[in-house]
Image (cartoon, rainbow, N blue to C red):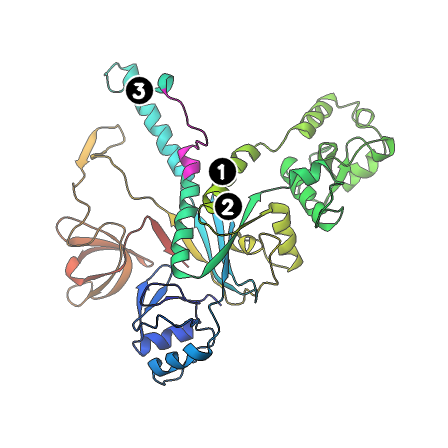
Amino acid sequence: MSKVFVIDSEKAPLNPIHPAQARQLLRNKKAAIYRQFPFTLILVESFPDSPIGFSSFDSTGTAFAERLAEKTRTASPISPLRLKIDPGAKVTGIALVNDSTGEVVFAAELKHRGFTIRDALASRRQLRRSRRARKTRYRKPRFLNRTRPPGWLAPSLQSRVKNIKTWIEKLRRFAPITAISQELVRFDMQLMRNPDIQGSLYQQGTLAGYETREYLLEKWGRQCAYCGVKDVPLQIEHIYPRAKGGSNSITNLSLSCEKCNTKKGTKDIKEFLKTDPSRLEKILKQAKRPLADAAAVNTTRFALLNTLKTTGLPVETGSGGLTKFNRSQQNLEKSHWLDAAAVGVSTPILNIRGVKPLLITANGHGSRQSCRTDKHGFPSRYVPRFKFVKGFQTGDIVKAVVTTGKKVGQYVGRVAVRSSGSFNLSTKQGLVQGISYKYCKTVHKKDGYSYAS
């Protein structure tokens, strides 16, 4: 069950509680809504000496103050949680797991805007080059007198790291997080290059098989290396056969369908493909080539690891193969938040019953353009100097209760402000135009993200 975050009146995080307990606190007016996304309550009364965690809080109608004071003497301490992260190029999975019980108390999927940033930078670059070509003296090129500092990341990659950092900081304010787990590398390259490496879980066994198979599926495009067939069961095949001295190194492995594997048998690959020299050359080159996106992905993930270390919490790392192994052992379906919950050796038997992930999309905070342009690049309208109108800004989530006129009713959605005070609301049912600011009440202030569940 997805739990509700609770903080005390001093804004210190307590144990997340069941939604029914949250409703009881709100009904008795012992707590108030502190934040809508993620949904968080703040207690009205202060008990600074209480280690209360609400893990066994009852929902009867007895006086809250007496109950809480009594629990101060007998309550269990706050249960520490582990924040688990599965970074991705487009979507990052996030899960909060109780290591002692295996319960997933919160899950989210964070959609990044890296590709949007890349396209915006490309558009800006083309515009500036066009102006230089026309000799408008707009902006001198600066690529010849700039050096990049150590650890530099492209803005589209840096955005992903900062998105995750932002959400780590948010969740640490609302939950008692004491450890972090991150999927650091997609595949354990050391294990696959040297299959005889020793250590915990590093013997030739199930985990090594998961690492190798997932890597080969990515490397060979999930198709047979010899005939190119797809959507059939694939087998791991030795390019140079073991019977003739071939090794188990990852550079000597490929994928083949059952038919090609049986046909090749213990033949040398040069003998097997002597009638198809172009395919032979392609396979031999591909065998020694690492994954195309490994460098960029690893660079970003190690930058994220350095960011996580600055939190001061212990950071556990694991590989993508280990994540799939943990997920498969517990028969969990493939999704970003479940991958996050299965990251690392510390993964317990997970309890995911009733968990519904929060879907988060990074939108940014707008643009610095002083005017909007048409499709030809000419100015079409100005942009107001100030973002706020009557206390609202575009991107806020508001609730409008309209009592008169054609649009009588209640609406909840994202607001787009106008200087006239007549706003537009984007709701689940569609766009509602011409809602006066007088009917609107802020539910969630704009923070650069949009939310769905």
Which residue lies under the disc numbered 1? 300
Local packing at callout 1 (Cα closer than 10 Å; few below 14, some 14-19, many 20+) is many
Which residue lies under the disc numbered 2? 87
Residue 199, horizontal then vertical, whole percent:
71, 47
Which residue lies under the disc numbered 3? 130
Per the image, is 154 magenta?
Answer: yes
The kind of secondary structure the magenta stretch mainly shows is loop
Horizontal relation, residue 418 to residue 119: left or right: left
Residue farthest to the bottom, as pictured: 62
> CA separation, marks 1 and 3?
32 Å
Q: Amino acid at mark 3?
A: Ser
Q: Earlier in the sequence, mark 2 or mark 1?
A: 2
Q: Are marks 2 and 1 in contact (CB under 8 Å)?
A: yes
Q: Nearest the camera: 207 or 172?
A: 172
Count of labels in the image: 3
Q: What residue is rendered at 16% in x and 58% in y?
A: 436
Q: Which residues are magenta?
A: 146-158
Q: What residue is rendered at 35% in x and 75% in y?
A: 25
Q: Amino acid at mark 1?
A: Thr
Per the image, is 423 magenta?
Answer: no
> CA separation, marks 2 and 1?
9 Å
Residue 420, horizontal then vertical, whole percent:
12, 50
> CA separation, marks 2 and 3?
37 Å
Residue 57 found in image quarter: bottom left
Residue 128 lies, with reference to residue 386, above or below; the image says above
Q: Nearer the viewer, mark 2 or mark 3?
A: 2
